[in-house]
Image: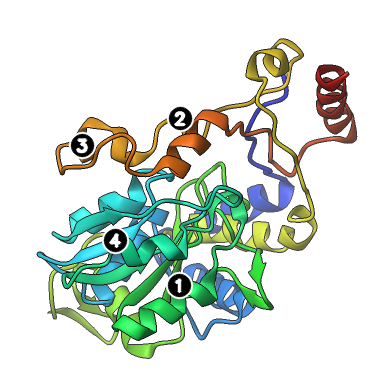
Amino acid sequence: MIPIAKPMIGQEEIDAVVSIMKSGSLAQGPKVKEFEEKVASFCGAKFGIAVNSGTAALHASLNAAGIKAGDEVITTPFTFAASSNCIIMQGARPILADIEEDTFNIDAKKIELAFTKKTKGIIPIDLYGQAYDADAVADFAEQHGLHVVEDACQAIGASYRGRMCGTLGELGTFSFYATKNIITAEGGMIMTDNADYAELCRRFRHHGQSEKTRYEYHELGYNYRMTDIAAAIGIAQLKHLPEWRNFRLSRDKVVETLRAKGVGCGIYYPKPLHMHPFYMSMGYKPGMFPNAELASKEVVSLPVHPSLSQEDLNAIVAAFEEMSS
């Protein structure tokens, strides 16, 4: 069986973790700072703020952007729940706009239909590593004075018209979960060019404390810090990203046949958010976002990890060739 996801852990990562363990500096420290600087440099952002998950990155970003109770934030129903849950965590309401049929990303034309006087932000998502239509979203946001927080959790290393994903909004977020392009086991990071946002995110991850004034609490914050252990893994992983991101895999609908041939696959995502009981209780109903519903019925996710061998790839191609013959 070819696994649908498999983290690439080599001797360099193992040695990095052992080194941190021996150093005795396990919590957020110099390795986190180094990882932040390297990711920001890779993406062309001024600031990187490491946290302990992609969810934490989204939550901190929304807080920095000033999203609060009573606000509305537009996002897509075809995504992992964290994208909308973080809006709710700020006391705001997620407003769903349908996706483009060909990209599975938020349809900029549908954002206007979801816009109200309560709308304060947009969370567009670079689904499956493919950038959303950043220019169209930015134009609408600028016209209406909205914040854009980019969910690039699946898209580190991808780009849009010469700009790196993670830098397409005021704030951008990455996840380094074990199934992502590069991993730290758990972890995330925020990208921004705004120094004030960067400071707010740093305080938010550390119980409202500034790194300049310990034990002085400026506002409510959380324990969202990344450890030096995780950062050491991330630094080693980041070196390999340019070679790993060259993989390009296709999709097909015949899950049963693929699995029978030993090809791991899954359905990401089997049901849009607006069709789950929790979001239906907010007034969403089936049929409201037909493209997201269509995608949920058609999408098949194939193995995407960088450790796929040529033999694995040949087996996947052969399975598709047999199905199409």
N-term-proximal mark, 2 vs 1 = 1
* Three-letter code for the amino acid on which mark 4 is drawn: Ala
**Left of 111 or right of it: where is 163?**
right
What element does badge 3 sit on? helix
Q: CA distance from mark 2 to mark 1?
A: 26 Å
Residue 94, picture quadrant: bottom left
Q: Which residue is mark 1?
A: 137
Per the model, the C-alpha gap separating discs 4 and 1 is 13 Å
Q: Nearer the viewer, mark 3 or mark 2?
A: 3
Within 10 Å of the Cα at label 2, are there few (<14), some (14-19), or many (20+) other Cα atoms?
A: some
Tell me where residue 189 appears, x and y as whole percent: 45, 65
Q: Residues within 10 Å of mark 1 (few under 14, many from 20)?
A: many
CA separation in Å, label 4 and label 3: 16 Å
Task: Give the number of the disc on residue 114.
Answer: 4
Mark 3 and 1 residues: CB-CB less than 8 Å, in contact? no
**What's the distance in space between the residues labelled 3 and 2, CA to CA?**
16 Å
Q: Earlier in the sequence, mark 3 or mark 1?
A: 1
Amino acid type at mark 3: Met
Q: Mark 2 is on which residue type?
A: Pro
Q: Residue furthest top?
A: 260
The answer to which of 299 and 32 lies nearer the viewer is 299
Q: Circle 4 — which element?
A: helix
Residue at 40 percent across and 32 percent down: it is: 271
What is the three-letter code of the residue carrying label 1?
A: Val
Image side of residue 298 versus residue 121, left or right: right
Q: Which mark is residue 280?
A: 3
